[in-house]
Image (tube, helix red, strand yellow):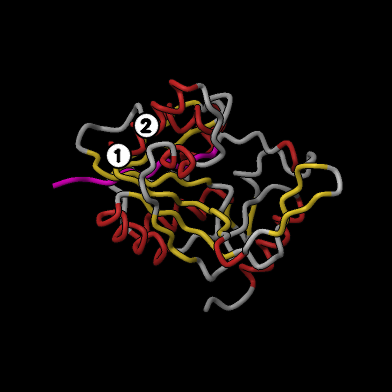
């Protein structure tokens, strides 16, 4: 029987936190470290049989180990996010058929969303949690010249992003061969011209980038869940 792995990315530098916290992944969030909230969601959903946790250094891996789901293997991240993902993909056991890739700086992912993504990926081979863009988005290339994009077709990508293991490995091999830089995993799969399904997220799932994001996540967690 095929198994599923989850890559939990925790090695981000957190430069834009402006020193407000020493490590945003270990920062307290409504009584738990940020990392622990993603880990708990995965454990509750029961979607993953194996975990690879990407860390910045040995000290961080020791701190995270108290909250890490099992069985898990730790790996040091690379210079860029895509390097960290490739380091983690290289550690997957041979019988892993599907893989979740999740930025632990998005701690509000819900177990039911993970279960839904797991169901979809087994049919589509590629699916991303995402939300519709509400703002008017304009393309700015030349001074003073703007182009309004049709927001009916615009989606903001979140994580987890989930793929058939062979597909995402092939996609990142192409990224490496062409020496490209991608900012999410779906962008790598786009290079193969493979369709990517979207699961609409109607709940806030912010990425913790600045101190204000931490305060916003605290507020969201203080509200009744719907």
Please say if 87 is above or below 127.
above
Q: Residues within 10 Å of mark 2 (few under 14, many from 20)?
A: many
Q: Which residues lie in the magenta part? A: 1-10
Total labels: the figure holds 2
Query: What residue do we see at 53% from left, 47% from top?
Result: 104
Decide if residue 131 is on the left or right side of residue 68. Answer: right
Residue at the image point whose x is 65% and y is 61% from the top:
217
Upstream in the sequence, badge 2 or badge 1?
2
Residue 77 x/y as whole percent: 52, 28
User: In the picture provided, is 22 more to the left or to the right than 226?
Assistant: right
Instruction: Indicate the secondary structure of the residue bearing disc 1.
Output: helix
With 75 as the anchor, is 28 left or right in this view?
right
Residue toward you, 153 or 80:
153
Check disc 1 and report the residue beneath it.
Answer: 165
**Which x, y percent locates residue 206?**
62, 57
Residue pushed farthest right? 144
**Disc 2 + disc 1, Cβ < 8 Å:** yes
- Viewer-proximal residue among 14 and 71: 14
The numbered dot on residue 89 is 2
Crowd around label 1: few <14 · some 14–19 · many ≥20 (10 Å): many
Mark 2 vs mark 1: give the one in front.
Answer: 1
Residue 190 locus on image (x, y percent): 44, 42
Tag 2's secondary structure?
Answer: helix
Q: Residue at x 65, y 33 (%)?
A: 13
Which disc number belongs to residue 105? none
Q: Nearer the viewer, residue 11 or 61?
A: 11
């Amino acid at each position: 029987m095929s198994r599923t792995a989850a890559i939990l990315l925790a090695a981000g530098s957190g430069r834009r936190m402006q020193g407000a916290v020493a490590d945003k992944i270990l920062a307290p969030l409504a009584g738990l470290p940020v990392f622990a909230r993603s880990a708990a969601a995965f454990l509750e959903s029961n979607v993953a049989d194996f975990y690879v946790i990407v860390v910045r250094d040995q000290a961080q891996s020791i701190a995270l180990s108290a909250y890490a789901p099992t069985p898990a293997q730790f790996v040091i991240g690379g210079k860029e996010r895509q390097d960290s993902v490739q380091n983690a993909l290289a550690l997957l056991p041979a019988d892993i058929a599907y893989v979740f890739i999740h930025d632990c700086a998005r701690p509000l992912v819900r177990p039911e969303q993970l279960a839904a993504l797991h169901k979809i990926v087994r049919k589509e081979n590629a699916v991303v949690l995402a939300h519709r863009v509400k703002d008017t988005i304009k393309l700015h290339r030349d001074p003073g010249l703007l182009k309004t994009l049709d927001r009916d077709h615009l989606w903001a990508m979140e994580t987890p992003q989930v793929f058939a293991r062979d597909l995402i490995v092939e996609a990142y091999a192409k990224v490496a061969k062409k020496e490209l830089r991608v900012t999410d995993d779906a962008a790598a799969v786009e290079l193969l011209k493979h369709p990517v399904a979207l699961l609409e997220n109607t709940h806030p799932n912010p990425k913790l980038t600045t101190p204000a994001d931490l305060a916003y996540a605290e507020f969201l967690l203080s509200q009744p869940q719907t």
